[in-house]
Image (cartoon, coloured by chain):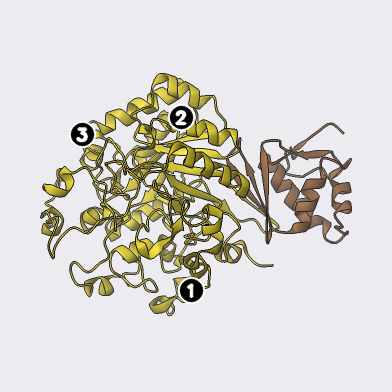
Amino acid sequence: MTSLLEEFQYGLDAPICLTWELTYACNLSCVHCLSSSGRRDPDELSTDQCRELIDEFERMQVFYVNIGGGEPTVRPDFWELVEYATAHHVGVKFSTNGITITDEAARRLAASDYVDVQISLDGATAEVNDRVRGPGSYATAMRAMRRLKAAGFAGFKVSVVVTRDNAGQLDAFQAIADRFDAQLRLTRLRPSGRGADVWDDLHPTAQQQRALYEWLLGHGERVLTGDSFFHLAGYGQSLPGLNLCGAGRVVCLIDPVGDVYACPFAIHDAFLAGNVCRDGGFAQVWRTSELFADLRRPSSGGACTACSAYDACRGGCMAAKFFTGLPLDGPDPECVHGHGDAPLASVAAGTAPRPSQDHSHRQHRTGPVPVTIGPRPLSPASVVPRPLSGPNAIPRRPPDRACDTNPLADLELGHSEMPVDVAG
Amino acid sequence: MSTEDGRFDLDGAWTLDERVSIRPERFGALLYHFGTRRLSFLKSRVLLDVVRGLAEQPSARAACAEAGVSGTELPRYHAALAALAESRMILRRSP
């Protein structure tokens, strides 16, 4: 019998779950924001357009959507849309920095089976968190978590992007999740959106990656990973999860203006499949896009084919390769066997593709990077501001989310023999 | 629910949890439980028929027979149903 993994490679009639970014507006300016969010885009989908999209999800039986942004809850119609989705059998998990989680919101959320909440936290201490997410953001997240717990919302998610600064705090993150009756979720830092600017300074070291892998092997049962660390399977043992790049096969991203991308981390014209308003609706894009058809064809391992770990890691993350300037059929920049080092060294400075959109708050584009990353000095490349025009201009960057959610968020798949595979 | 030793009662009456949604796919179906937020995969169309038949048939064994599952195949479907009960996708009901 064909394995599920093989089935997934050919794509499904509808995504298992998808990420939907409702707005680029955000009260924060996280240095690693995958969607370079900050300011609202004037062309963001209207409430009616959002409702139509939800109707389409219902017809396609998209079981649930991961809503993000930006900070999705700052949209005035946010709660209305959540209610509309759940009334139409589309479950919602939304990512938030916690800013709008009042006591009353927490009570409403706790009362719904169909809504899950994910609080973004990138440091187990205010010091580490606020360096990346901005002053006061740790306190905001903690306040939201206290309120959710007080309202009796057990099992909400605490979502952490693992960085060089917080990789040593995994036990502390677990303790925070335990304290609030929440579940810890760890995901990989991607060089997408503003993440490209801080990648060199913030992506975990090889030693930290190894420690993370060991930690996940020991704690995998309790921790969600959005399946984002499958490149670590190259160490030898698969982590719980799909261990497959689901881009365009089982997941995708719809951005605030209705553009459909292969995955939330690949917001670039090269991965744009169509638009839900202009191209006949979401189902049409999902089922007939040439880009997605391409992604669903078996791919060659390229330079990785000869590597004994290829079956395990599958060459790693498409988006991580793309935005670091590496070929898509070669090793991941964080290849655990170090095969990414030589190709990375040969990428000429400034030639890696840049996001095609940028909704950052303006001070981020005109001034120096306002947030200091960690105690060690930044490399010059990430500190020197680039001009807005001219040959070294900052190209417009792709949208992404403040709180990066892999669309496979809850799909921690366990494989039983057959014919049932159960995910939890 | 399956009993404590993990066995599944084929002769009991079962039904799909009302919070579970089924989406047929080429390889079988996807099941999603809105309460537990768990996803399950049915890796054959026959199993999908079995699951859909549970509520109408007096027992899981009868639902298997109705879907054309023969004797030698039964253990596989037994195991699949046990896994579904384990994850609360299907529940005991009064016969």
Earlier-in-chain disc, 3 versus 1: 3
Is residue A152 something one can see in this rendering? Answer: no
Q: Chain of mark 1?
A: A
The quarter holding residue A339 reads bottom left
x%, y% of residue B35? Answer: 61, 35
Q: Secondary structure at mark 3?
A: loop
Q: Which residue is depicted at the point 44% across and 41% down?
A: A67
Residue matched to label 1: A299
In the depicted structure, whether residue A346 falls above or below residue A157: below
**The C terminus of chain A: image quadrant:** top right
Q: Chain of mark 3?
A: A
Residue matched to label 3: A135
Q: Is the residue at mark 3 from the same chain as the one at mark 1? A: yes
Q: Which residue is depicted at the point 39% across and 49% down?
A: A187
| CA distance separating discs 3 and 1 | 44 Å
| Nearest the eye: A311 or A302 | A302
Mark carried by residue A79: 2
Kind of residue sitting beneath label 3? Pro
In the depicted structure, whether residue A156 falls above or below residue A390: above
Q: Is residue B72 left or right of residue A181?
A: right
| Nearest the eye: A384 or B91 | A384
Colour assignment, chain A: yellow
Earlier-in-chain disc, 3 versus 2: 2
Mark carried by residue A312: none
Chain painted brown: B
Q: Secondary structure at mark 2?
A: helix
Q: Is the residue at mark 3 from the same chain as the one at mark 2? A: yes
x%, y% of residue A330? Answer: 37, 73
